[in-house]
Image (spheres, rainbow, N blue to C red):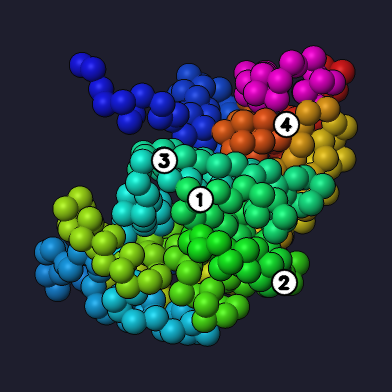
């Protein structure tokens, strides 16, 4: 069957590809340590699971409004007030099938053929594909490693053309873990206001921040910035609810209405039961969120120090999310590999450690390690990488 042109250039997710390869090796009996995961390794907190069971027993198993249950929107609204001091109306919120689907729907309603979206590198793998699927053109701006992978206002300004529709900001970032400060966001925001560029602010890792860093949403910096921002967030990472598929967008009414109309013809609504679970996630105790954050921070501190001691690896210390994004260019050279992609393949084959090559994130000299796995597995993985390097040197 000849498939549509729009899927011809679709590249499968690099993260899922490495996870699949690692699973294949595991199934063949190899002891593989997978550091490719993009999801917390904790179970969903029990009170959230119980809320879902209760919802099912009470018969909440039917269609819901396309944009999400009013009760869930109300909890999301309270969360924005609590965490960012931002006030939204229900018509400014849409609940989607995960943050990924919120972004997908947003680009579908926003972009005409040839419209440009500025994507800072390193980027989350799905941004360029989603933009292209909507007929848009990704325009990459390099977040330099020496600038902690952040883009500058000058770089942003230089990338804007008459076709620029939006810029994606992802803080805390997947894959680098970097966080933009309020001052940095303000400077970037001013350029966006000046040029009428919509800000897509992906804040899915908001709750996972370390070393006393603070998460700031660009929308809280001024009413003008709020009016020109669509915030993307969800419960996947904060409440360890990746499989429940609940995310949302908050932004200008006209955009949210168009997204809701589109959702009414695509998904109808996010799963009713999962929406009840998300209500419990936001209205119930938040201690589990903090406990998971602390566990991630402990792992980060232990594993970061060990990683940077391996010859050939350098790494900007992340302030958020649950990834390390070291530069492995020198390590690849030392191991006799032509590219970092080749290095990652050799590591999996010989050391049985699965990392994700940075090429999938627009940063071919880097690799991504997820520390959303046990400390024991992480420490064994580091030992294996070290041994691999010693054997190859
Ligand atoms: C930066 C970023 N945005 C969005 C998502 C999607 O989250 P969800 O599971 O809610 O679709 C992810 C998941 O990996 C992510 O890393």
Label 4 neighbour load within 10 Å: few <14, some 14-19, many 20+: some
Q: Quadrant of residue 145?
A: top right
In this view, the residue farthest toward the front is 162
**Residue 347 falls within the magenta-colored stretch:** yes
Q: CA distance from mark 2 to mark 1?
A: 26 Å
Q: Which mark is residue 38?
A: none
Q: Nearer the viewer, residue 166 or 310?
A: 166
Residue 330 versus residue 321 in the image, above or below: above
The earlier-in-sequence mark between 2 and 1 is 1
Which quadrant holds the N terminus? top left
Label 3 neighbour load within 10 Å: few <14, some 14-19, many 20+: some
The earlier-in-sequence mark between 2 and 3 is 3
Q: CA distance from mark 3 to mark 4?
A: 30 Å
Q: CA distance from mark 2 to mark 3?
A: 32 Å
Q: Residue at x 75, y 67 (%)?
A: 211
Give percent across and percent down for residue 199.
51, 62
1 or 3: mark nearer the eye: 1
Q: Which mark is residue 183?
A: 2
- Queried on whether the Cβ of the residue with tag 1 lies below 8 angstroms from ligand 1, the answer reads no
The earlier-in-sequence mark between 3 and 4 is 3
1 or 4: mark nearer the eye: 1
Q: Secondary structure at mark 3?
A: loop
Label 1 neighbour load within 10 Å: few <14, some 14-19, many 20+: few
Residue 19 versus residue 200 in the image, above or below: above
Residue bearing mark 4: 365
Which quadrant holds the C terminus? top right
Q: Which mark is residue 162?
A: 1
Q: CA distance from mark 4 to mark 2?
A: 29 Å
Q: Secondary structure at mark 1?
A: loop
**Residue 204 falls within the magenta-colored stretch:** no
The earlier-in-sequence mark between 1 and 3 is 3
């Amino acid at each position: 069957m000849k498939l549509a042109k729009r899927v011809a250039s679709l590249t499968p997710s690099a993260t899922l590809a490495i996870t699949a390869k690692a699973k294949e090796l595991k199934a063949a009996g190899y002891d593989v340590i997978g550091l490719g995961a993009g999801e917390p390794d904790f179970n969903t907190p029990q009170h959230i699971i119980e809320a879902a069971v209760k919802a099912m027993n009470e018969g909440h198993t039917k269609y819901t409004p396309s944009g999400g249950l009013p009760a869930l929107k109300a909890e999301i609204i309270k969360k924005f007030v609590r965490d960012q001091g931002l006030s939204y109306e229900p018509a400014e919120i849409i609940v989607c099938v995960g943050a990924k689907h919120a972004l997908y729907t947003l680009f579908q309603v926003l972009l005409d053929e040839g419209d440009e979206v500025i994507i800072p590198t390193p980027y989350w793998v799905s941004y360029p594909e989603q933009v292209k699927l909507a007929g848009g053109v990704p325009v990459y701006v390099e977040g330099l490693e020496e600038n902690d992978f952040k883009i500058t206002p000058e770089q942003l300004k230089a990338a804007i053309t008459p076709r620029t529709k939006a810029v994606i900001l992802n803080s805390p970032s997947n894959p680098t873990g970097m966080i933009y400060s309020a001052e940095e966001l303000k400077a970037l925001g001013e350029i966006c206001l000046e040029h009428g560029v919509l800000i897509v602010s992906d804040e899915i890792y908001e709750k996972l921040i370390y070393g006393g860093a603070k998460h700031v949403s660009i929308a809280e910096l001024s009413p003008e910035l709020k009016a020109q921002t669509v915030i993307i967030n969800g419960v996947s990472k904060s409440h360890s609810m990746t499989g429940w598929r609940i995310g949302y967008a908050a932004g200008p009414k006209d955009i949210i209405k168009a997204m809701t109309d589109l959702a009414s013809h695509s998904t109808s609504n996010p799963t009713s039961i999962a929406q009840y679970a998300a209500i419990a996630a936001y209205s119930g105790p938040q201690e589990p969120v903090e406990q998971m954050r602390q566990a991630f921070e402990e792992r980060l501190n232990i594993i970061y120090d060990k990683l940077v001691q391996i010859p050939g690896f350098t790494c900007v210390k992340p302030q958020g999310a649950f990834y390390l994004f070291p530069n492995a260019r020198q390590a690849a050279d030392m191991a006799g590999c032509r590219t970092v992609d080749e290095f990652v393949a050799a590591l999996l084959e010989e050391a049985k450690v699965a990392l994700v090559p940075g090429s999938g994130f627009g940063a071919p000299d880097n690799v991504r390690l997820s520390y959303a796995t046990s400390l024991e597995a992480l420490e064994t993985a580091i030992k294996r990488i070290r041994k691999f390097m010693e054997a190859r040197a």
